[in-house]
Image: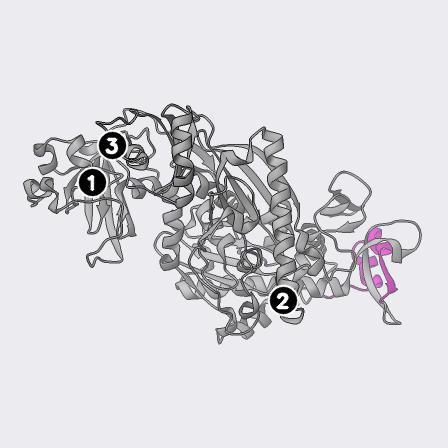
Amino acid sequence: MGRDVDQALSGTEGGGRGFMTEAVASRVRLRFVEGKGDAAKHTETRVPAGTTLFDAASWNAIAIDSTCGGHGTCKKCKVQVVEGGVAISNLDPRAFTPDELREGWRLACRALATTDLVVNVPPLQTRPKAALVGVGRHVILRPAVQKRHLVLDEPSLEDQAGDLERVFAAMDDLELHASLDVLRELPGILRGAYYDVTAVIVDDELIALEPGDTTARVHALAFDLGTTTVVATLLDLSTGQPLAVRSMLNGQHRFGADVIARISATMIEPDALGELQRLAHETLAELTAEVCAEAGVAPEEIYEIVVVGNVTMISLALGIDPGPLGMAPFIVATRQPVPARAVDFGVLVHPRAPAVTFPALGAYVGPDILAGIVATGLARDRRIRLFVDVGTNCEIVLGSSAEAVATAAPAGPAFEGATIRCGMRAAEGAIEGVKITDAGVEIQVIGDTEPVGICGSGLVDVVAELLRVGLLAPSGLLLGVEDVRERLPGLADRFVRVPNGKGGEERVFVLAWRGDDPARAVYLSQVDVRRLQEAKAAIATGWRMLVQRLGIEESDIQQVLLGGSFGAYLTPASAVRIGLVPKLSVTRIVAAGNVAGEGAKIAALSLPERHAALALLDEVEYVEASGNAEYNDLFLAELTFPA
């Protein structure tokens, strides 16, 4: 190792979990070696300088022994650095002999990688606690929230240590601080509990002392603060399991269905920002009450919340002026996670519970997308993958552990049913799937009830099916009745004309009749097809622009991940047929689900994953589509459907 261990043991070369003060490279290369000889498994990775070896291993699914989850208390996460140098931390001498320290043995949770290293990882002696979260990700449980049961010696005339010093001395493996609020409560709690207490710690802050042993009850709340829907998940941090999940419509919807409408409201109405903040708080508070009641958990037993959402939703909930997000050059108040507490979001849990947020790459690739990157593991995977979160504003990320780029595409609200003649959200009564046969049209309706409209997945399906059977031209033009009679005569009676609301008529394709009047039917109009073409073109232009940015071919993409509720309902074959996604085998197009919400859960369960999310600011390049010289040409080329 080439290190003076005696000097390090004397304390002149300590380590810890603080920030590095020396100049180091922004990223370092690590090689983990598991096993010995020819059977050894070698894993190479690059991580931000200053990352602990424990965190780096966790990100790459390398299991290192630990029962405390990397908090430094169990001293089981022993690894040997065989090439490169790692400073000796203040805990290492408690776990190793001087000879072992000279041989490069370190506690992985305290070993900071500041240069390229080769690290031997011993076989597991215990199995670390982990949870299956996100898109098939096993996340080792290491929450920021931890509890320590303390039975303290009572003070005496001979033992004059202060109350706070007495508590901190019992946890001397941690470097803690406490607020004035904790000091106000401390004397009464200690004496009332006869010095038998549980310390509640979040990161490096002592936020509470509780009488007796309450270590079995430790919880966090994860929120997905969506523009349309808000989801709350109550988590048991000791097991990683959700105890209750509830969702409801965002109370801000009365100000408009999209972020632009809500930003505009704050610029026009003086009181709009305050009202939008109040509505967000009411929504979050109501969901908190519901999940607590369902799980039988007292709000004060929730010690942390995680909130993800787009930049506008986070800004409105915290009362931050969103005006600059709606005007070029579209600047966010901060790209870093916003420092806040739960009460700042109107969430009344433990009064000193912090609120964790994610960073943002830009105004329209925000915390929800970075949470999605964490949940999918896109930036940790060697495969080149495409992540598409479809909505009014469609966020797109392409890349791998080597390099990743992201952009936003203004898809418009067509995929959410807005601007579509018979469009609606993916709710009961919405046509979600369509199949055209010689005999007619087969439809799938959410809730197995009478159809009342068509949602985004149904819109994509019907257009893809019409293209497949030749009743819709690649240009997007619906065939005339005479042409339909020649191709599929059984469908001719579904091609009719209805009033267009402007004194004329428009051509439509009827999906479901509701009486004899075509105007009352659920149908696809020629205008609807145009709306879909524009939305599809925006998304396809976005990912093709990123393909060019990385200098790869469409065929190099190995998997497509579709986020959100739209992705869950969308038929992969239909998405390929209309050109929405690259031409991949349908088995490689995956409905990733609510990855933003999954990312929020991961952040609650794993402190290393939060560090990984913050590192994404340097690992993922943000590309502003409106500033790309080739965007308009690419967009025009994508307006037509594949022949």
N-terminal of the pair, mark 2 or mark 1, is: 1
Q: Nearer the viewer, residue 421 or 281?
A: 281
* Mark 3 and mark 2: Cα distance apart in space: 57 Å
Q: Nearer the viewer, mark 2 or mark 1?
A: 2
Q: Quadrant of residue 538?
A: bottom right
* Mark 2 and mark 1: Cα distance apart in space: 54 Å
Measured from the top left, where is residue 115 in percent x and y?
19, 51
User: Residue tagged by mark 3?
Assistant: 160
- Can the viewer see residue 159? yes
N-terminal of the pair, mark 3 or mark 2, is: 3
Label 2 amino acid? Thr
Badge 2: residue crowd in 10 Å (few <14, some 14–19, many ≥20): many
The boundaries of the magenta stretch are: 477-500
In the rendered image, the vertical position of residue 440 relative to residue 257, given as above or below = above
* Mark 1 and mark 3: Cα distance apart in space: 46 Å
In the picture provided, is 222 more to the left or to the right than 290? Answer: left
- Secondary structure at badge 2 equals helix
User: Residue tagged by mark 2?
Assistant: 266
N-terminal of the pair, mark 1 or mark 3, is: 1
In the rendered image, the vertical position of residue 65 relative to residue 381, given as above or below = above
Badge 1: residue crowd in 10 Å (few <14, some 14–19, many ≥20): many
- Secondary structure at badge 3 equals loop
User: Residue tagged by mark 1?
Assistant: 119
In the picture provided, is 619 more to the left or to the right than 358? Answer: left
Q: Are marks 2 and 1 in contact (CB under 8 Å)?
A: no
